[in-house]
Structures are given as C-alpha cells and as structure tokens.
Image (spheres, rainbow, N blue to C red):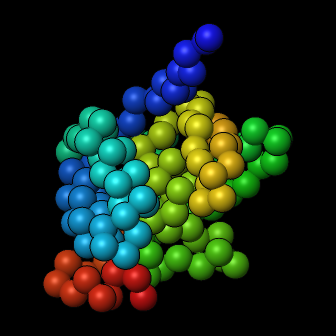
C-alpha cells in the first residue's frame, strides 16, 4: 500500500507587523473558528518573519492585490484583508478564510494546495502581486468582538 504524502508547502515570507497582528487575530478567533485559526497559526509558525521593509514586492501580504490561477485554469484577482474589511463582491477576501490563509506569504510563481470548507482540495498559483498597503483597517487589538465586523 502506498503512503499518501502531503504536498510540500512552499516557503513563505511575512513582515513582522503582519505576523504580530495575524498571530493576535488567530488566537482571538480560536474559540469561534478553531480550524481556520489553527491553519493560520500553522502558516505563521512556518513563515520566515522579516522586517516589514524587507518583504519582497512580489510576496502576498495584508493589503496585497493578488492575481492567481486555479487548478481549473480560472484566473482571479483578490485583495487579502482583515475580516472587518472583507467584501467578496469587491474581491476583498479575509485572511480568516481557507484561501486567504493559503495566499498569505506566497511569492509570484509559487503554487499552494488548500482545502475549502467543504473539504475539497484545490490548487492555486500566484501570477501577480500589487498594491501593498501599510495601514489596513478592520483589526483592533483591544476588542476581540470587533475582529469579525
């Protein structure tokens, strides 16, 4: 019987500020959405954390607009945001979604497997990263009830 191997995850890079804010967010979300919180914490743990100014321009971070291709050949563009700024109609996806967590820290050309909430496996490849913003709203470190609004 063959052993099933998990696909190797690509190396990811995260800026110090995003790392700290996302770590706080993941812990705050642990009671409400433990599976997503755990997934985000796993990604943060394996990330190479660098100074904010050292994050390469081709790496997905909070506020990035990301163009990616799916395993079905569809090309999509989304902006990775904190939960309070999420609006699927505007293409703003929360980092507290399976695809949002999967995109975090990827560089152009990298491919990542991810599992949707319905347990279906997907694959995406990042083709472009633009619009890095340094001041993203939607996250307040003082009130966890505000994290999801």
Residue 148 location, x and y as percent? 40, 82
Residue 139 location, x and y as percent? 31, 78
Q: Residue at x 68, y 43 (%)?
A: 122
Residue 133: quadrant of the picture: bottom left
Horizontal side of residue 6 vs 1, given as left or right: left
- The quadrant in which the C terminus is found is bottom left
Can residue 65 be seen by looking at this rendering? no
Q: Residue at x 66, y 43 (%)?
A: 121
Pick whichever, 88 or 32, lies toward us: 32
Pick whichever, 95 or 131, lies toward us: 95
Q: Residue at x 40, y 51 (%)?
A: 39
- The quadrant in which the N terminus is found is top right
Residue 35 location, x and y as percent? 42, 59
The tally of labels here is: 0
Residue farthest along the left direction in this orientation: 142
Pick whichever, 121 or 76, lies toward us: 121
Pick whichever, 128 or 14, lies toward us: 14
Q: Residue at x 25, y 83 (%)?
A: 144
Q: Is residue 57 above or below residue 85?
A: above
Residue 21: quadrant of the picture: bottom left
Q: Is residue 11 above or below residue 41?
A: above
Residue 34: quadrant of the picture: bottom left
Residue farthest along the front direction in this orientation: 1
Horizontal side of residue 100 vs 127, given as left or right: left
């Amino acid at each position: 019987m063959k052993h099933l191997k998990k696909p190797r995850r690509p190396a990811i890079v995260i800026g110090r500020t995003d790392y700290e804010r996302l770590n706080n967010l993941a812990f705050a979300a642990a009671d409400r959405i433990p599976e997503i919180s755990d997934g985000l914490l796993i990604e943060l743990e394996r990330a190479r954390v660098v100074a904010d100014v050292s994050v390469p321009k081709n790496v997905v971070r909070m506020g990035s607009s990301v163009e990616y291709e799916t395993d079905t050949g569809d090309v999509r563009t989304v902006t990775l945001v904190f939960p309070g700024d999420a609006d699927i109609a505007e293409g703003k996806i929360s980092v507290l979604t399976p695809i949002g967590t999967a995109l975090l820290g990827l560089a152009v050309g990298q491919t990542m497997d991810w599992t949707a909430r319905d347990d279906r496996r997907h694959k995406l490849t990042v083709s472009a990263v633009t619009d890095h913003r340094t001041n993203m709203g939607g996250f307040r470190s003082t009130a966890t009830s505000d994290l999801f609004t």
